Image (cartoon, helix red, strand yellow):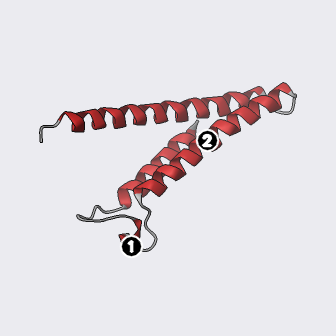
Amino acid sequence: MAQPISNAIAAYRTASARPVTPGEAGPESAPAGRRDFSSFLREAAEDTMETLRGAEQMTAKRVAGEAGLLDVVTAVNDAQLTLQTVVSIRDRMITAYQDIIRMPI
C-alpha cells in the first residue's frame, strides 16, 4: 500500500518541479530533461495500466496456487487506489472543462 502513495508523491514532485513559463508552446520549447504535459499524462496512464495488469496477474497466480493471499490483497488494493486516483483526476478535469465552458467571453 505504501508503494502507490510513494509513486503518487514522486509523480507530484516531478510535476511540481517543472517551472511554469509564460508563452511556452510545447515540448520543442521545453528545456532539455523536462517533460511536456502530454508525455506526463502518457506516462501516468502507462503506470496505471501496469498497476492494474499487475493486480490481474497476481490474482491469476493465486488461482493457480502460485501466490499468497497477502500478495493478492496488496496488489488489488494498489490497483483500487490507482483507479480511484484516476477517476478523481478525471472528475476534476471534467469540472474544470465545464467551468471554462461557462465563462463569459
Q: Quadrant of residue 93?
A: top left
Q: Which residue is mark 2?
A: 49
Q: Is label 2 in a helix, a strand or a loop?
A: helix
Q: Which mark is residue 31?
A: 1
- 52 vs 105, nearest the viewer: 105
Q: Position of residue 69 (x, y in %)?
A: 76, 26
Q: Residue 25's spot in the image, x, y percent?
A: 32, 65
Residues packed near mark 2 inside 10 Å, few (<14), some (14 to 19) or many (20 plus): some
- The answer to whether residue 90 is left or right of residue 97 is right
Q: Residue furthest bottom?
A: 32
Residue visible at 41% across and 36% down in the picture: 89
Which sits earlier in the primary sequence, circle 1 or circle 2? 1
Q: Is residue 85 left or right of residue 62?
A: left
Q: Secondary structure at mark 1?
A: loop
Where residue 99 is drawn, which disc sits there? none
Query: Which residue appears at 51% of the width and 41% of the height?
Result: 5
Nearer to the camera, 54 or 65: 54
Farthest residue, direction right? 65
Q: Tell me the residue at 19%/33% (across/down).
A: 102
Question: Quadrant where the C terminus lies?
Answer: top left
Type of residue at label 2? Answer: Met
Amino acid at circle 1: Pro
The residue at the point 42 percent across, 35 percent down is: 90
- 105 or 96, which lies in front? 105
